[in-house]
Image (cartoon, rainbow, N blue to C red):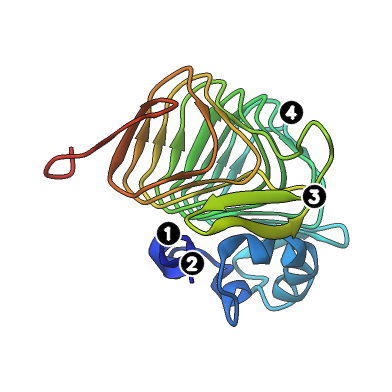
Amino acid sequence: MNEELKIGNLLDTSKTIASDIFEGLTYPWEALPKISAFIMELGKTLPESEYEKRGDDIWVAKSANVAPSAYLHGPLIICPEAEIRHCAFIRGSAIIGSGCVIGNSTELKNCIIFENAQVPHYNYIGDSILGYKAHLGAGAITSNLKSDRSIVTIPVDDGRLNTELKKFGAIVGDNVEIGCNSVLNPGTVIGRNSTVYPLSMVRGIIPENSIYKKQGEIAEKVNGE
């Protein structure tokens, strides 16, 4: 079993309203096909005193700050104190955690954004999960579909792990920092507390507490820095 890829080694599931979606799963990407249906069931349980329901499948916390120019498509849950900025484009099947920032011209699709994560400038997050306090610099994106449209696999010690998903962007662990204009290729998994340099092209597994400088050059953080 690939321990570093397990949910508990990448994500603190207490830091998302979607914690129950991970029950019974081994790897975080197994939750991706379940997001839409999960939102519809969870939405029914959200208190009317705290959430405003818009249409049939959008729930927005009353304390969230949503710009009038933002586009919201369901199924969608926006949690308390989240900030959805000018011209954000949310295409649906998205869970946006408390205190998150979804910025100008950022596009979301089929994703779970944990509490206090930030994608504030020109980002694309598709078929991906961002952990607690993860941050993507301006222009950083998740690429969620291989050029040949084949199933996404992840390189592991004994070969390649088949995710059984054609669309799968990235799993970004808690407290990860992604530099500006970086691309996370399909099936990228970045461990907790790691940093990716700007203008990086990332694929595969980046261990926790690492600094990704370029392909083939990954340094271990010393004393967490």
Indicate which label's residue lies in the foreground, 3 or 1.
3
Using residue 217 as the reference point, say whether residue 72 is left or right of it.
right
Q: Which label sits on residue 121?
A: none
Q: Position of residue 186 (x, y in %)?
A: 66, 40
The picture quadrant where one finds residue 67 is: top right
Instruction: Name the residue: 48% across, 38% down.
Output: 118
Left or right placement of residue 179 versus residue 84 in this view: left
**Badge 3 amino acid:** Lys
Q: First in sequence: mark 3 or mark 1?
A: 1
Q: CA distance from mark 2 to mark 1?
A: 5 Å
Secondary structure state at the residue bearing disc 1: helix
At a point 47% along the width and 20% down the height, the residue shown is: 180
- Cα distance, mark 1 to mark 4? 34 Å
Could you say whether the residue bearing mark 3 is in a helix, strand or loop?
A: loop
Residue pointed to by mark 4: 69
Q: Is 202 on the left or on the right of 91, as rendered?
A: left
- What amino acid is found at the position of numbered circle 1 in the picture? Leu
> Under tag 4, what secondary structure?
loop
Question: Tag 2: Cα neighbours inside 10 Å, few (<14), some, or many (≥20)?
Answer: many
Say whether marks 1 and 4 touch (CB < 8 Å).
no
Q: Which mark is residue 166?
A: 3
- The front one of 144 and 122 is 144
Which residue is identified by label 2? 7
Q: Neighbour class for label 1 at 10 Å: few (<14), some, many (≥20)?
A: many
Circle 1 is placed at which residue position?
10
Q: Quadrant of residue 125?
A: top right
The answer to the question of whether label 2 and label 1 lie on touching residues, with beta carbons closer than 8 A, is: yes
